Image: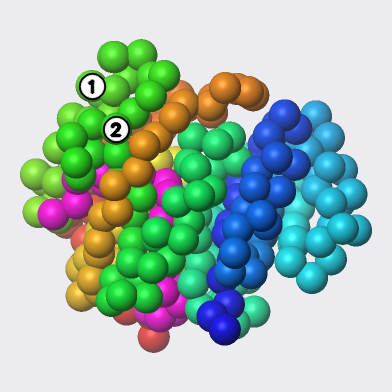
Amino acid sequence: MDKKVVIIPTYKEKENIEKIIRAVFALEGDYHILVIEDGSPDGTAAIVKKLQEEFAERLHMIERKGKLGLGTAYITGFKWSVEHGYDYIFEMDADFSHNPNDLPKLYQACRDGADLAIGSRYCKGISVINWPIGRVIMSYYASVYVRTVLGMKVYDTTAGFKCYRRQVLETIDLDKVKMKGYGFQIEMKYSTYKLGFKIQEVPIIFVDRTEGTSKMSSGIFGEAFWGVMKLKMRKIRPRK
């Protein structure tokens, strides 16, 4: 059976973490979870540790000292997942904006030939619930901007709900990935695209978090905007 692991970065997610873990483990297909915990002061790590007693073989956690950024959390998780022999590596938020029931769709897309499957808010129109209209417009046109500048035929370029085949993460030079916030999501997709891997978007409905607090900031968007310009100039080479 394929080995599958869902990477979930957390910072102050005590309201959501147990529910999201149980929702993933309720799926058929023996999914594992790796929580990357960035020193949450609200006791998120303690909740995960308690659940590890119940799900000893399937629930893993890496604790880091302080909030070190989304990109570095996923890089840490990718390296751990490759080292531990997982065949399919997923990214997912802890706050239920990504529906765990969509994980099998992403997995199946990769089984059917995709190297990277993206849970896409924009490949079939706009599928976003509970966001202010200003944020929807900003997110949608950010993806239009990225698609135009980079020439990458991906409608949801900042999506954070994804499934990679292990070979992709073994090929990308993860130590050369520069962006840390949502720009990280763009950079990983662009690297995947430039290295010749097949990308497929799978339509999902994105629902904004109902519990906990958003980690979005204007600095995250600023990094992504200027980072795309720099990314266009870079040569993307496989890891040696």
Residue 114: x %, y % from top left: 29, 71
| Residue in the picture at 87% in, 58% down | 54
Looking at numbered disc 2 in the image, what kind of residue is underneath it?
Ser
Image quarter where the C terminus lies is bottom left
The residue nearer to you, when weighing 20 against 184, is 20
CA separation, marks 1 and 2? 12 Å
Q: Which residue is mark 1?
A: 137
At numbered mark 1, what does the secondary structure look like: helix, strand or loop?
helix
For image coordinates 79% across by 70% down, the residue present is 57
Q: Where 64 sits versus 122, above or below?
A: below
Q: Please state the horizontal and vertical placement of residue 149, each as a whole percent of the image.
A: 11, 46
In this view, the residue in front, 148 or 103, is 103
Mark 1 or 2: in front is 2
Q: Is residue 150 left or right of residue 219?
A: left
The residue under label 2 is 127
Residue 160 is inside the magenta segment: yes
Locate residue 97, reporting x and y percent. Answer: 49, 35
Q: Residues within 10 Å of mark 1 (few under 14, many from 20)?
A: few
Q: Is residue 129 above or below residue 240?
A: above
The magenta-colored residue range is 153-171
Would residue 38 appear left or right of 83 to someone viewing this image? right
Mark 2 neighbour class, 10 Å CA radius: few under 14, some 14 to 19, many 20 or more? some
